[in-house]
Amino acid sequence: MPENFQTPRGTRDFLPEEMIRREAVINTVKKVFETYGFSPFETPAFENFELLAAKGSGGDAIKDQIYYFKDKSDRELGLRFDLTVPMARVVANNPQLPKPFKRYCIARAWRYEEIRKDRFREFWQCDVDTVGSSSMESDTEILAVAVDSLEALGFKKFCVKLNNRKILSALIDFVNAPEKKKYDVFRAIDKLDKFGEETVKDELKAAGLKPKQIRELFKFITIEGSPGEVIKKGEKILQSSIGSQGLEELKKIVELSKSYGFTDKIVIDFNLARGLDYYTGPIFEVVDMSGKNIGSLAGGGRYDDLIELFGGRPTPATGISLGIERIVEVMKQEKMVKLPKTNVKVFVANVNEEVKKDTIKIAQELRKNGISCQVDLMSRKISKQFEFADNLGVAFVLTVGPKEVKKNKFKLKDMKTGKEQELSLEEIIKKMTSER
């Protein structure tokens, strides 16, 4: 007996009903991206391993998660772990691109990591980036795009957490932490909300920090209050030039957010660090606040050195990625979107084989008018055709028999209400097109 093959661990199949849901989410987000002037963009699923593993790219933590392989010519390759690094390569190789270069990309990425709820090894990312602008206007616009996208999907209770890698770098200097361990410190404090104080303190100790340094660091990263209050408290503690620059950038984003209408959603959170090493300025995370422990819905930040790292000119850039996997699961659980099981609008059923050609002609006429339909391909009896259409979730069944063909009057049954009408093909087309 043949082996029953399964999907590789950490990957999934998506049957039509699930794909309809996912495509509805993606199309909604894509529409918002395009209203802000972002254009579609795509890169290969795999890249040279040297690019993906470059120091200053994803960092050591990501390097270990890359799906690595060699091709038949012994070239070292890897599946992309995000959509930002490949985009930076493209910009580095195409300096003639008009700036700002505003792109979006909705595609798969892969990371060999622990499988948890809403976290898989193959996943979709939904990125929007602005390249070429060092102004905080571009960061604020990116955040506005994320806010508008989530609101368009029906999310209401969420906040936009802000911090700045410059502030975190200044904090490393302030507490006299080892510079070579700064990324370890960043990754540790980023876990505060998820794993708690004790876990973070243990990781900070492992990174070489002494108890006094940890106390000073915690005093800073646990500052709370309105955006203005948190920034003021931060200014009293961090007075280095790089720290002041980071705080000023946050001030600018908060001020600009008033014009976009999402200031009420902003929270300045000094323990936000983001895991990737390539961030250089403002970093952000959109977090659900419904109390249902959903977690992060989107995340990103500014990465001004990445394009130069890959051989391009010094080029500022910023972007955010929406967590499509988590968003889709939340919307499914909370019944935030009601969609049909199938995109097929009409099943054209034939009473017998004599009218099969007529059935196909009618189906073709419906398709020419943009109406999705199916015909029987299994030589089923009429009752079985109705049963199949019902199981598929088709909205209407159009019955074709010798009498109907002769009169050009066909029975159209609404499968939800059970109501049946006798209509000409022209009337059916008019009804279907008016209901779109």
Image: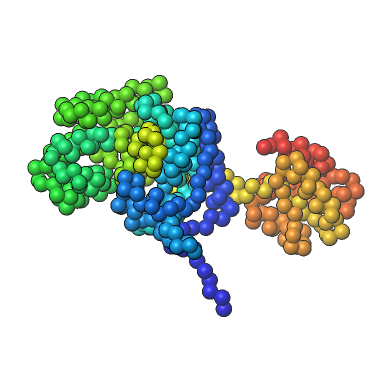
Q: Find residue 368 and report its horizontal and vertical position in percent.
A: 76, 42
Of the pair 372 and 435, the residue shown nearer to us: 372
Q: How is the image coloured?
A: rainbow
Can the viewer see residue 151?
A: no
Q: Find residue 236 and report its horizontal and vertical position in percent.
A: 16, 26
Q: Which residue is rendered at x = 41% and y = 44% of the image? A: 85
Q: Which residue is rendered at x = 38% and y = 30% of the image? A: 139
Q: Which residue is rendered at x = 33% and y = 22% of the image? A: 255
Q: Find residue 12 and report its horizontal and vertical position in percent.
A: 49, 58
Q: Pick the quarter of the image with the C terminus.
A: top right
Of the pair 213 and 172, the residue shown nearer to us: 172
Q: How many marks?
A: 0
287 horizontally vs 377: left or right: left
Q: In this view, which residue lies farthest toward the bottom?
A: 1
The quadrant in which residue 250 appears is: top left
Q: Find residue 42 and report its horizontal and vertical position in percent.
A: 52, 44
Height in image: 328 above or below 6?
above
The quadrant in which residue 295 appears is: top left
13 horizontally vs 66: left or right: right
The quadrant in which residue 121 appears is: bottom left
Q: Which residue is rendered at x = 33% and y = 30% of the image? A: 266
Can the viewer see residue 390?
A: yes
Q: Pick the quarter of the image with the N terminus.
A: bottom right
Q: In this view, which residue lies farthest toward the right?
A: 406
70 horizontally vs 193: left or right: right
